[in-house]
Image (cartoon, helix red, strand yellow):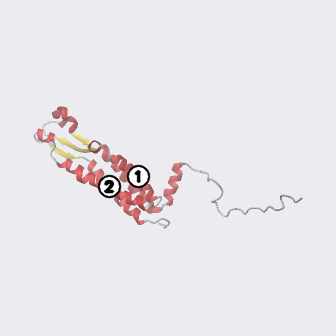
Amino acid sequence: MAEPEADRTTAAESAGEDSKGIPTRNGSFAGTAAARLRASGRLGWAVFALGAVGAIFLVLAELTNLRHTTVITASCSDLAGAKADKCSVTGGQQHHYALIPLALLMLVMSWGAAVGRARAAAAALIAIGAVVLVIAIAFDLPDTRKVGALSEDFTGGKEHAGPAIKFEIAGAALGIVGGLLGLRRRYGEPD
């Protein structure tokens, strides 16, 4: 009878790392993410930084004062009584914190445009910036310039724009610029 080992041939070893099984992760999520961002090159860093700073500005716009009413004789809240909550409005109160999800989406899209070199993510950055710009210029800016009901009630009452409008416009502009830079990149091209 023939030996069973005699007819067997040995399998060739794999040439690369592809067939060696499931890779183990040596680093943490943050370490892996930082390594991927470093590997994206200078232009990738710029795209991500513009999107991240733009997202921070959008969050700041929601938390800061959009408009406030001043009165010459006393403080607005002293004179307004039951309407004292209308003396000052934050960006979040104005549009129900709608810029927070847009800021998170801007951050994610800037990551995709920077690290993944995704043109769709770069285009989404431009679209998010355009939407925020429309909100800032078409809706919020006119509210900071009109004479509010409290201003009409008091002599010398006046509406003033707060810093939120500047944060909205700056965040939108940074998102648009980051998206335009992201569109210049191609997958596989060196920076």
Task: Report the front residue among 63 and 128.
Answer: 128
**Among the two numbered marks 1 and 2 on one chain, the one whose residue lies closer to the N terminus:** 1
Q: What whole-number distance in Å separates the C-alpha atoms at marks 1 and 2? A: 12 Å
Residue 35 seen in the current view: yes
> Image quadrant for the N terminus?
bottom right
Residue 174 seen in the current view: no
Residue furthest out toward the right = 1
Tell me if 75 is positioned left or right of 8 in this view: left
Label 1 sits on residue: 107
Residue located at (41% from left, 52% from top): 107
Tell me if 191 is positioned left or right of 6 in this view: left
Secondary structure type for disc 1: helix
Task: Report the front residue among 127 and 93.
Answer: 127
Amino acid type shown at disc 1: Leu
**Image position, residue 191 (x, y; %):** 47, 66
**Image position, residue 176 (x, y; %):** 34, 59
Task: Report the front residue among 182 and 37.
Answer: 182
Residue furthest out toward the bottom = 189
Badge 1 local density, few (<14 within 10 Å), some, or many (20+)? many
**Image position, residue 68 (x, y; %):** 21, 42
Badge 2 local density, few (<14 within 10 Å), some, or many (20+)? many
Residue located at (36% from left, 50% from top): 102
Based on the displayed image, in which of its 4 quarters is residue 114 positioned? bottom left
Secondary structure type for disc 2: helix
Amino acid type shown at disc 2: Ala
Label 2 sits on residue: 172
Task: Report the front residue among 144 and 8.
Answer: 8
Instruction: Please say if the residues under marks 1 and 2 sit with CB atoms less than 8 Å apart.
Output: no
Relative vertical location of residue 142 with respect to residue 87 in this rendering, above or below: below
Dot label at residue 129: none
